[in-house]
Structure formats: structure tokens, C-alpha cells
Amino acid sequence: MDYTKQQINFLAKQFNDRCLPKPEWTHHAHLIIGIWHVHHYGFFDAICRMKSGIILLNNFHQTENTGNSGYHETLTIFWSTIIAEFIRLNENLLLEESVNAFLTSPLSERTLPFEFYTKEKLMSSYYRACYVEPDIQPANALTVHKLLSKKINNIQL
């Protein structure tokens, strides 16, 4: 599905107004919200806004933010880093082009963090509460570029 600018902005408005329905708070919605925030505010401001936004949206959904559920600091900063590098590498793309290109790239894979982090560590309450740098490979421009160069189903991205 290709997302329009209007659909992306509506999703961002629902997120920022803390009224996005829980069934619509999917992995892709998380990524779209991340792209929207980094696109509009830059990396550091985006993290601050998303952190509070996710926690408040979880409260709206009655999802507890604890060491075992809800907000995850390391994942939020990890995904924001990947998104920021993608946007930097594709700085001429419009918001909707960035969203659609990112969502169809290997960077959008739900399992991507496990190429950077040991699963047991990443799922720990410590990594949920505090940001920890990747222990397998760094999340930087070089690794993002490498991942974007992967072939999927013999199609070069």
C-alpha cells in the first residue's frame, strides 16, 4: 500500500492527539510515526516527542509502561537512528516518498533490530528502560546503506 501525505498526516495527528486506536498501532504505524517526526523535527526533537507520545498513547490504550511491556527506550532510539540515516541518505524525497520507500525496504523488517542486538539483551528490562548501543553491529550510515543494497527476491533496491 502506498501512503498519501494526507494519510500520513492523519496518522500523525491521531498519534499526537493520543487517540490512535490500538488495532491501528501496528509496526508500520510505529515506523510511519517515526519517519513523520524525524522529517518534521530532526533526530533529537523527534525522539523527545515520540518517547512522550508513545508513553501517553500506551496509557490511552491501557498498556502499562513497565520493564516488560509498553515503551522501549532502546528500540525507540534504534528505529529513530535507522530512520534518520535513511532520510539523510534520501534527503530529496518528500515525506510520502520517504514513508513508502522505507516501508518497502529491508529497513522496515520487524526483525531488523536482531541484526544489531542480541535478542536476550534487547528484550531485557534494562534495554527497555535505558538506551544501549548495539552489540552486534553499529546502527550508522554504513550499515543502513549496506542493508539498502541487499537484494530481496533478486530485485535490487
Image (cartoon, grey):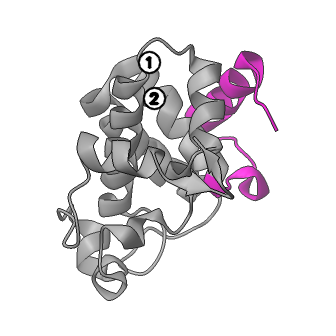
Q: Which mark is residue 13?
A: none
Give the x, y percent position of residue 70. Answer: 48, 67
Asked whether residue 100 is drawn in magenta, I would say: no
Q: Which mark is residue 37?
A: 2
Q: Provide the residue span drawn in magenta.
A: 1-27
Q: If the image is split into quadrants, where does the N terminus sit?
A: top right
Characterize the local packing of mark 1: few (<14), some (14-19) or many (20 or more) Cα atoms within 10 angstroms.
few
Q: Is residue 82 left or right of residue 133?
A: right
Query: What is the three-letter code of the residue carrying label 1?
Result: His
> What residue is at 34 percent from the left and 25 percent from the top?
88
Give the x, y percent position of residue 21. Answer: 75, 49
Q: Is residue 132 left or right of residue 79?
A: left
Element on which disc 2 rests? helix
Residue placed most toward the observer, 55 or 113: 113
Asked whether residue 15 is drawn in magenta, I would say: yes
- Residue 17 in view here: no
Q: Is residue 1 above or below residue 71?
A: above
The residue where tag 1 is placed is: 40
> What residue is at 43 percent from the left and 62 percent from the top?
71
- Residue 75 in view here: yes
Contact, mark 2 vs mark 1 (Cβ under 8 Å): yes
Element on which disc 1 rests? helix
Q: How many callouts does the rendering have?
A: 2
Characterize the local packing of mark 2: few (<14), some (14-19) or many (20 or more) Cα atoms within 10 angstroms.
many
